[in-house]
């Protein structure tokens, strides 16, 4: 069974006030990944990802577009 996903933001332009982003994460040396709950703007997600990266150096964080 196949499905269709829709982007919550424009995938080509990442303006700081675009809504529809969340924080994605993965371990650097383990095979685990996930995302944090909550929707925010790209600017907020980028700032929070940088803060989390400083606190937890064993993980990598990035702003990730939500697809439904």
Image (tube, rainbow, N blue to C red):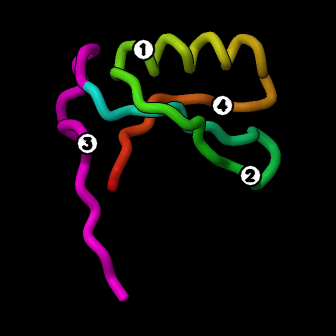
Q: Judge depth for marks 1 and 2 and give the one in front.
A: 1
Of callouts 1 and 2, the N-terminal one: 2
Marks 1/2: CA–CA distance: 24 Å
Q: Is residue 4 magenta?
A: yes
- The image shows residue 18 at horizontal and vertical percentages of 24, 23
Circle 2 packing at 10 Å, graded few (<14), some (14-19), many (20+), is few
- On the rendered image, what quadrant is the N terminus found in? bottom left
- On the rendered image, what quadrant is the C terminus found in? bottom left
Tell whether label 4 touches label 1 (CB within 8 Å): no
Residue holding disc 1:
44
- The image shows residue 12 at horizontal and vertical percentages of 19, 37
Tell whether label 3 touches label 1 (CB within 8 Å): no
Marks 1/4: CA–CA distance: 17 Å
Residue holding disc 2:
32
Magenta stretch, main secondary structure, is loop
Of callouts 3 and 2, the N-terminal one: 3
Callout 1: helix, strand or loop? Answer: helix
Q: Judge depth for marks 1 and 4 and give the one in front.
A: 1
Residue at image position (18%, 37%) is 10
Marks 4/3: CA–CA distance: 23 Å
Span of residues in magenta? 1-18
Residue holding disc 4:
60
């Amino acid at each position: 069974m196949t499905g269709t996903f829709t982007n919550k933001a424009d995938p080509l332009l990442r303006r700081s006030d675009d809504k529809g982003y969340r924080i994605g994460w993965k371990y650097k040396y383990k095979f685990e990944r996930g995302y944090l709950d909550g929707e925010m703007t790209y600017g907020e997600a980028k700032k929070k990802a940088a803060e989390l990266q400083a606190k937890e150096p064993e993980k990598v964080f990035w702003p990730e577009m939500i697809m439904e």
